Image (spheres, rainbow, N blue to C red):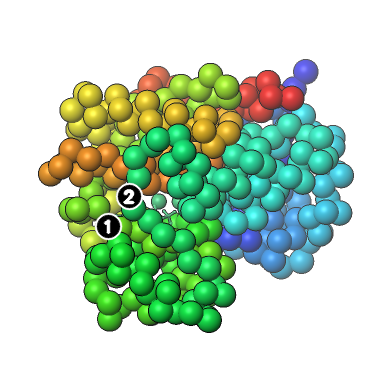
């Protein structure tokens, strides 16, 4: 019998449009002889759009307002064998939708509540990975209340780390709200921006040189496998929003031109991180490799990475011999295995 799949796309985060692009690719790739797929686009206001508005959003990339409250629609997800929550960022990749689907008793693709939430929050990720002995840059946490009441204490943490440093909202993606702070005079503006987007902000020491950015895909549940390692190269000072989403600004290299022992270590550390954070199904784990010093730092774990046919994650497994449609089929199988 065909499996009935509910494909959720769009969502409330800044990565709404990216999600719609990924969903279009997945919709086209799930083999029709095995799956009966119903897409539902979640509007930027967090409402589930009816079928006609969903189709229009997928075709045009623009979601209409309106639709049903998520809680109201969760029960109707019950008729499905599995849900593919192809949502990025807060309210999609952070354990919220995963909690709803868990309560409703429906299997879903990707990490559960814990793995999603722990991997979304950059500070929590760092804490968990530090206890697993995984190398990371030096960092400090600051919360909004401190910034309002005792800004000098927050500034002192930045001075501890030294300049340049990075200031980031703890729970975003796509480089939104991230600043590279070159010196003390740029610090307040960076903190004000990050705190306008999140209650929790992370300050991070910059790697000793502009790092090489290498990424690896993980696939599986309790016995996951790692893909070949990929690399992104670009001219910009760091991998900011414009570089990520402007055609031609970044180049993907698969496999990454790395010494074999560095690539092996990337894969090994990524598998350890996936298990330490209790991830499931899939994740793309991103690293900084400092060629000058040979240092390797784990930067972040993305539990629902970009998923168009030209995105890094599917390309990495493509290089391992798994076609895009085999990959999405495998993800649904992994969701059902976790039941
Ligand atoms: P996002 O989740 O938004 O992708 P990241 O933590 O990956 O946020 O940061 C975005 C980019 O900023 C990275 O890909 C890298 O180019 C740069 N960057 C972030 N932190 C550092 C750091 N500590 N040292 C050097 N570059 C960094
Ligand atoms: Mg991220
Ligand atoms: Mg990143």
- Where is residue 208? Give x, y as percent: 19, 53
Q: Considering the numbered disc 2 on the image, is that residue within a helix, a strand or a loop?
A: loop
Q: Residues within 10 Å of mark 2 (few under 14, many from 20)?
A: some
Does the closest atom of ligand 1 sit within 8 Å of the Cβ of label 1?
A: yes
Position above or below: 256 against 198: above
Image spot of residue 214 (x, y percent): 30, 40
The residue indicated by pointer 1 is: 206
Q: Residue at x 81, y 59 (%)?
A: 69
Q: Residue at x 52, y 49 (%)?
A: 124
Q: Are marks 2 and 1 in contact (CB under 8 Å)?
A: yes
Say which residue appears at 34% left-offset and 40% top-offset: 135
Q: Which residue is mark 2?
A: 137
> Residue 122: x, y in percent?
48, 52
Q: Is residue 281 left or right of residue 184?
A: right
Q: Earlier in the sequence, mark 2 or mark 1?
A: 2
Tell me, yes or no, if residue 59 can be seen here. no
Label 2 residue near ligand 1, CB within 8 Å: yes
Quadrant placement of the N terminus: top right
Mark 1 secondary-structure assignment: loop
């Amino acid at each position: 019998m065909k499996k009935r799949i509910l494909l959720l796309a769009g969502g409330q985060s800044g990565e709404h449009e990216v999600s719609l692009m990924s969903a279009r690719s997945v919709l086209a790739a799930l083999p029709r002889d095995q799956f009966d797929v119903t897409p539902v686009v979640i509007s930027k206001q967090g409402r589930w759009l009816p079928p006609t508005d969903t189709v229009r959003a997928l075709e045009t990339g623009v979601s209409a307002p309106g639709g049903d409250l998520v809680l109201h629609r969760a029960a109707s997800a019950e008729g499905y064998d599995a849900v593919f929550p192809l949502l990025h960022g807060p309210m999609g990749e952070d354990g919220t939708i995963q909690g709803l689907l868990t309560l409703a008793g429906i299997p879903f693709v990707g990490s559960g509540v814990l793995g999603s939430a722990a991997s979304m929050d950059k500070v929590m990720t760092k804490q968990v990975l530090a206890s697993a002995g995984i190398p990371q840059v030096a960092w400090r946490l600051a919360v909004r209340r401190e910034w309002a009441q005792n800004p000098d204490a927050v500034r002192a943490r930045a001075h501890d780390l030294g300049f340049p440093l990075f200031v980031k909202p703890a729970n975003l993606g796509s480089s939104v709200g991230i600043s590279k702070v070159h010196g003390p005079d740029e610090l307040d503006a960076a903190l004000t921006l990050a705190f306008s987007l999140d209650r929790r902000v992370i300050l991070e020491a910059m790697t000793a040189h502009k790092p090489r950015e290498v990424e690896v895909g993980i696939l599986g549940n309790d016995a996951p496998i790692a893909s070949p390692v990929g690399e992104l190269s670009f001219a910009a000072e760091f991998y900011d929003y414009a570089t990520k989403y402007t055609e031609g600004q970044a180049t993907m290299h698969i496999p990454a031109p790395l010494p074999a022992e560095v690539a092996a270590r990337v894969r090994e550390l990524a598998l350890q991180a996936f298990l330490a954070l209790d991830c499931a199904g899939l994740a793309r784990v991103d690293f900084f490799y400092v060629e000058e010093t040979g240092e390797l730092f784990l930067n972040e774990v993305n539990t629902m990475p970009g998923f168009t046919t030209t995105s890094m994650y599917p390309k990495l497994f493509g290089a391992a011999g798994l076609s895009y449609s085999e990959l999405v089929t495998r993800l649904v199988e992994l969701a059902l295995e976790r039941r």
